[in-house]
Amino acid sequence: MQPLRDLRGLWLLLLSFFLLLFEVARAGRSVVSCPANCLCASNILSCSKQQLPSVPQSLPSYTALLDLSHNNLSRLRAEWTPTRLINLHSLLLSHNHLNFISSEAFVPVPNLRYLDLSSNHLHTLDEFLFSDLHALEVLLLYNNRIVVVDRYAFEDMAQLQKLYLSQNQISRFPLELIKDGNKLPKLMLLDLSSNKLKKLPLTDLQKLPAWVKNGLYLHNNPLECDCKLYQLFSHWQYRQLSSVMDFQEDLYCMHSKKLHNVFNLDFFNCSEYKESAWEAHLGDTLTITCDTKQQGMTKVWVTPSNEQVLNQGTNGTVTVSEDGSLRFEKVQVEDGGVYTCYAMGETFNETLSVELKVYNFTLHGHHDTLNTAYTTLVGCILSVVLVLIYLYLTPCRCWCRGVEKPSSHQGDSLSSSMLSTTPNHDPMAGGDKDDGFDRRVAFLEPTGPGQGQNGKLKPGNTLPVPEATGKGQRRMSDPESVSSVFSDTPIVV
């Protein structure tokens, strides 16, 4: 009877053990206890400062926060945890000796939101290294030895808001992280301070939204001094951006192998940055943004006539979009002026003024511009041709006329103002007849009873003609008779 009782007790013990396993499994909890050298408090596992050379195995699946900082970890492989930690939202790996991270190391933690890899020995950030962290919001990589940042290292991280890359050896500005806002649309803080940046894409940085520039930290870099750099940071200072206001003394640049504060570049004689006005032409469609330092602010627009712009529009052409932008449909001349944006947020309010200039003409396309230029060119060529025709092909009046035919005394004009020293008859046709002479008489401002208006003779008046000195011989005019054209004495030729 005694062996039978012992056997029955053993079966009851086994049954109780299996029931316990079933209840634990149904509750979704692992039976794995807290790893050695770790401190467990609810769903928090702290294994910090334990000189661990590797990650403890068999981590509880319910772990939400895992602290492995201040240990001797050197590599983070793909199989660093055999358990899929779907509840893990924070992973602390700072102050280790990590120099290698597998591209599949973060597959077991798909819901991670906070990752601290600071103060390690990382040299490069390879492509798609963090692409499995779709829910990650904060990534700390400061105080490493990072030299190269691959352009695709932060792919598929649409939720990332803060990225710390300070105190590394980065020499290329990763513009792809913030340009156009497509790769990291929610990134509001990018810390690149204390690196080896010498040149910045100044034009691209100036075009960034204010809420991005407000969290772009660039101090303690050996930047090259120039006026564009001064204008960039002076504009940020004017806008009271945190990235400049918090570290004004640490913003310096290099010139002639010496460090100079960015705001003290008097030797360059740089001009201040000026906000440019928005420009539009008649009939254009235009969207003006309210460039605030923080996202998600409530925005109210006021027109130059001090009227609030409603979502439905005050005059049918101006409306406020859902994102707080001011949208114009078919811009008119009366839309020009200074618009004011009042932005209200949880921590502060902001007031911005924007000027709109409207040109009183429509903007032609490329085809119309080409036609106008072609027409202008043809008109110029035609004008030149007409001028040449006028200069060289017009009929001659006097100097190109040939020898005139002899005319009778009745055909001579009393009002002729031309004086010719050349005889109008053939000198070889001389004879003894007096009518062989062809006399022409001209007067310039004559005085006498027979004078008419403008020095002309009135009809009916007689003019005495000197007699010839000899028959059949014509008295030729001398030079004195030619020069007397300016006198009041009639000249006989």
Image: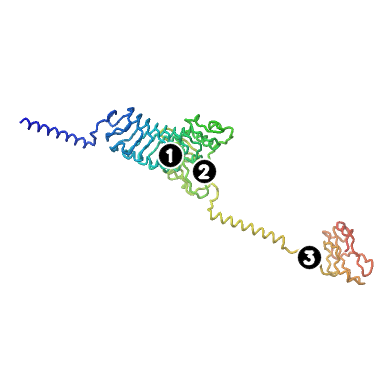
| 70 w.r.t. 314: above or below | above
Q: Are marks 2 and 3 in contact (CB under 8 Å)?
A: no
Amino acid type for the residue under numbered disc 2? Trp
Going 15% across and 33% down the picture, which residue do you hit?
A: 16
Label 3 sits on a secondary structure element that is: loop
Q: Are marks 1 and 2 in contact (CB under 8 Å)?
A: no
| Dot placed on the residue nearer the N-terminal end, 1 or 3 | 1
Give the mark toward the camera: 2 or 3: 3
Give the mark toward the camera: 1 or 2: 1
Q: Residues within 10 Å of mark 1 (few under 14, many from 20)?
A: some
Amino acid type for the residue under numbered disc 3? Arg
Can residue 297 be seen by looking at this rendering? no
Mark 2 vs mark 3, CA separation in Å: 68 Å
| Dot placed on the residue nearer the N-terminal end, 1 or 2 | 1
**Residue 219 falls left or right of residue 493:** left
Residue nearest the observer in this picture, 345 or 88: 88
* Residue topped by disc 2: 278
State the image coordinates of residue 201 (x, y, percent, origin top left): 50, 40
Mark 1 vs mark 3, CA separation in Å: 90 Å
* Residue topped by disc 3: 401
| 149 w.r.t. 475: above or below | above
Q: Residues within 10 Å of mark 3 (few under 14, many from 20)?
A: few
State the image coordinates of residue 318 (x, y, percent, origin top left): 47, 45
Q: Residues within 10 Å of mark 2 (few under 14, many from 20)?
A: some
Mark 1 vs mark 2, CA separation in Å: 37 Å
| Dot placed on the residue nearer the N-terminal end, 2 or 3 | 2
Label 1 sits on a secondary structure element that is: strand
Going 32% across and 27% down the picture, which residue do you hit?
A: 50
* Residue topped by disc 1: 149
